[in-house]
Amino acid sequence: MELYTHEYFMNEAFKEAQKAYDSDEVPVGAVIVANHKIIARAHNFTERLNDVTAHAEMQAITAAANSIGGKYLQDCTLYVTLEPCVMCAGALHWTHISKIVYGARDEKKGFTKIHQQILHPKTSVISGVLETQCSTLLKDFFQTKRK
């Protein structure tokens, strides 16, 4: 039995999303894994940094590159609670990341809705891991905001 499953690492990304939620950020969390080890953890910082590019994925890419000492993330997997947007997918393309695993679909702004071929040709994608849990946190956040 594999100790480190997609669900295990998505739960770690979910913990990051919860940190974002608790900080009044859109609750998206991400971790990047290499050799079954988390090398980067991040969540949205767009409000705190007043920076529209401070998505969880972008923060994780920077942390992972610093961790490995290089800009390419071959043989790494990104786990993110929400389907990446086109900006993040474009950045992930340039990293040559091997795999992206996401929880909730982003029906409005997700890369698969807008431009499926934006990723590097060698990048594989797995969707729907802990989808209900990830979607519920996002829905709760936005319902709270609308009150």
Image: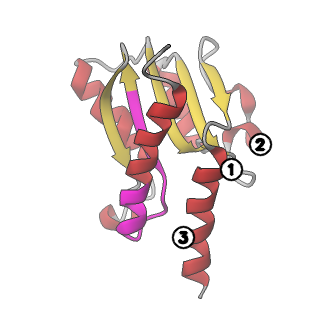
From the top left corner, tell me how far across and down residue 138 is, in percent: 58, 61
The stretch drawn in magenta includes residue 8: no
User: Which residue matches tag 3?
Assistant: 141
User: Which residue matches tag 2?
Assistant: 113
- What residue span does the magenta drawing correspond to? 18-32
Residue at horizontal 75 percent and vertical 52 percent from the top: 107
Residue 38 placement: quadrant = top left
> Between residues 30 and 10, which one lies in front from this camera angle?
10
**Is residue 66 positioned above or below 34 on the image?**
below
Q: What kind of colouring is applied to the model shown?
A: secondary structure
Residue at horizontal 22 percent and vertical 19 percent from the top: 69
Nearer mark to the viewer, of 3 and 1: 3
Label 3 close to label 1 by CB (< 8 Å): no
Question: How far separated are the C-alphas under marks 1 and 2?
Answer: 8 Å
Number of other residues with Cα within 10 Å of mark 3, as a class: few under 14, some 14 to 19, many 20 or more = some
Amino acid type, callout 3: Phe
From the top left corner, tell me how far across and down residue 2 is, in percent: 48, 15
> Between residues 11 and 35, which one lies in front from this camera angle?
11
Question: How far separated are the C-alphas under marks 3 and 1?
Answer: 15 Å
Label 1 close to label 2 by CB (< 8 Å): yes
Instruction: Point out the image quarter for the C terminus.
Output: bottom right
**Is residue 30 positioned above or below 95 on the image?**
below
From the top left corner, tell me how far across and down residue 45 is, in percent: 36, 57
Nearer mark to the viewer, of 2 and 3: 3
Residue reaching furthest to the front: 1
Amino acid type, callout 1: Asp
User: Which residue matches tag 1?
Assistant: 106
